[in-house]
Structures are given as structure tokens and as C-alpha cells.
Image (cartoon, grey):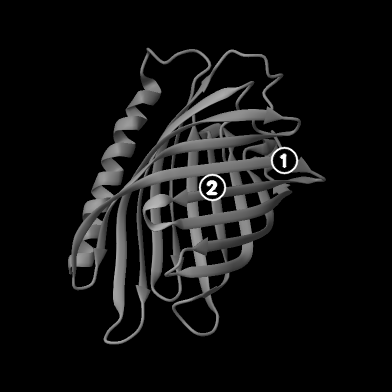
Amino acid sequence: MQGRGRWQSQRQRIGGILLAFAMAFVHPAASPGQTFEITGGETVFSQNSQYYFGEVGDFYPLGLPGGSRTGQSASPDVGTAATGGLTLHLFVEVFYFSYETPGPPMTTQNAYNGLNPAAGLRVPLKNGFWEGDVGIALAEAFQTATPVESLAGVYLQTEYYQGLGPGAFDFFANYIGYIQYIYGQARYFSPVGETHRRTVTFFLGPELIGQGNNNYNAGQGGVVLGVALPRLHSYLTFDGGLLRSSVSDGWGGYQGFSWYVSF
């Protein structure tokens, strides 16, 4: 019951932050050229592991020479805002991550309620971009039969996007310092269809994910489906596949979902 209560509290916290930021979309004082973003999603693993997140952010053009709006290719869309020239990216992420570690004398439940404020630069490239971000990782850690612990450390994030052939390659990675946790994700998207008048466009491709630290690690491989909804300024992502982790023998599975909106 304590785990359920923590998750309900986390959902309320995420919902409050995202709602407050959503109100900023209609704020008349928004600077020309700024782009706001809001995103959220989940990934559920076999072996009793799950990850939920929400993020709000702001892309602010620095007004320096950098070419056209190459920060995002129009096709395929990988679920990020279009930017032009050198761009400042400010964002705050909240998340809940938990996993189980089996072993004597009992299975241990590990959970983290986290908050990551960060800032970085998006640098335009031909048919793509590179972004690097630095911030602070804060969390409350819950572990079976252990007092709640407050943690703090560095937060690092990077993304590289490049148009390649009929589609595009996207690599994303981050690092949470207080538990030395690394996450890396590589995807390739190709357009596979669209509806009449291009109100919906579909993208499909493979993905590989590696993540972990000294106490837990997992490798994943699967398929990702992207759904672009330009009239709603939205991009939906569905992914799933096979997973093998250090907390269980044999193979399991995973599935994920995210929704990205930018204005």
C-alpha cells in the first residue's frame, strides 16, 4: 500500500507541474521565437520494473547565426520542437523509477521520486542537430526496510539527430549522478504512411536500449512506432520488444508510450 500511495502522490506532483506549465502556452508575454514543450510517458518492464516521467521545457533562440530551422527535420519527425540557429533549452523533468532486486533474505524494492532541472544548448547541423544539457538530479529514495533517503547529484543529457537515407537516426542518453545510472537509446525512423491531407503521418523503425549501474542493468531491442499529428502539435511514440536484465534469468519484454506537444 505504501508503494501505491507514493505513486499516487507522484502522479499528483507530475500533473500539477504539467498543468501549471500548460497555462504558459497561452500567456501573452511569451517572447517571439520561443517554443514551449510538454511531454510525458511510461515504460513498463518485465521483472517488475517501471519508469514514468513528465517534462516541461522552453526553447529560446539566441539570435546567433546558425542557418535555417535545421533543429528538426520535417520528415521524419522524431518528437521534438523545430529550432533555428543556436538555441537555449531549459527544462524540468519529474519521474518515478522502481525495480526489484531478488536475493536473500528477501526481494528488495527500490524506488526513486526524482526531479531534474537542467539547461543546455541545441546546435544545428545539416539535416539534424546535437544537444547537450547539464543540470541537477534530486530524488527521494525508497528501499525495502530502509529509511527514506534524500539524494542529489549531477544530471547530464545529450541527443543527436541526423537525417539518413529515407528516414532519420536519433540517439538519446542521460546520466543520473546520485546512483551513477546511465541510459542510452538509439532509434531509426522511416515514414511508412499518411492519411488524406497528411493530418496523420506514421513512422516505423528499430530501437536498441541499454541502461543500468553497478546494481542493475538491462539490454533491450524492439520496434518503435511514431505518429505525427501536426494539427495538434503532437507526436505519439509507442515502442516494445524484448528485454534481459540482471534481476531475472531469461528474457522478458517491455512496452512504452510517450506524448510530446510543442507550441
Look at the picture and state if 246 lies above or below 79. below
Nearest to N terminus: mark 2 or mark 1: 1
Q: Viewed as shown, does residue 97 lie left or right of 11?
A: right
Residue that label 1 marks? 162
Q: How crowded is mark 2: few (under 14 residues within 10 Å), some or many (20 or more)?
A: some
Give the residue type that dot 2 points to: Leu
Location of residue 57 in the rendering, given as x and y in whole percent from the top left corner: 43, 32
For the view shown, which residue lies furthest in the right direction?
A: 165
Location of residue 134 in the rendering, given as x and y in whole percent from the top left corner: 47, 37
- Identify which residue is drawn at 62% across, 14% down: 64
Location of residue 165 in the rendering, given as x and y in whole percent from the top left corner: 82, 45
- Identify which residue is drawn at 23% across, 66% down: 3
SS at mark 2 in the image: strand
Q: Viewed as shown, does residue 198 lie left or right of 241?
A: right
For the view shown, which residue lies furthest in the bottom direction?
A: 104
Q: Residue 76: in sight, yes or no?
A: no
Where residue 179 sits, quadrant-wise, is bottom left
Q: Residue 126: in sight, yes or no?
A: yes
Q: Residues within 10 Å of mark 1 (few under 14, many from 20)?
A: many
- Identify which residue is drawn at 31% across, 58% down: 112
Residue that label 2 marks? 236
Give the residue type that dot 1 points to: Gln
SS at mark 1 in the image: strand
Location of residue 232 in the rendering, given as x and y in whole percent from the top left corner: 51, 35
Look at the picture and state if 168 lies above or below 97. above
- Identify which residue is drawn at 70% across, 50% down: 189
| Inter-mark Cα distance, 2 to 1 | 20 Å
Look at the picture and state if 189 lies above or below 244. above
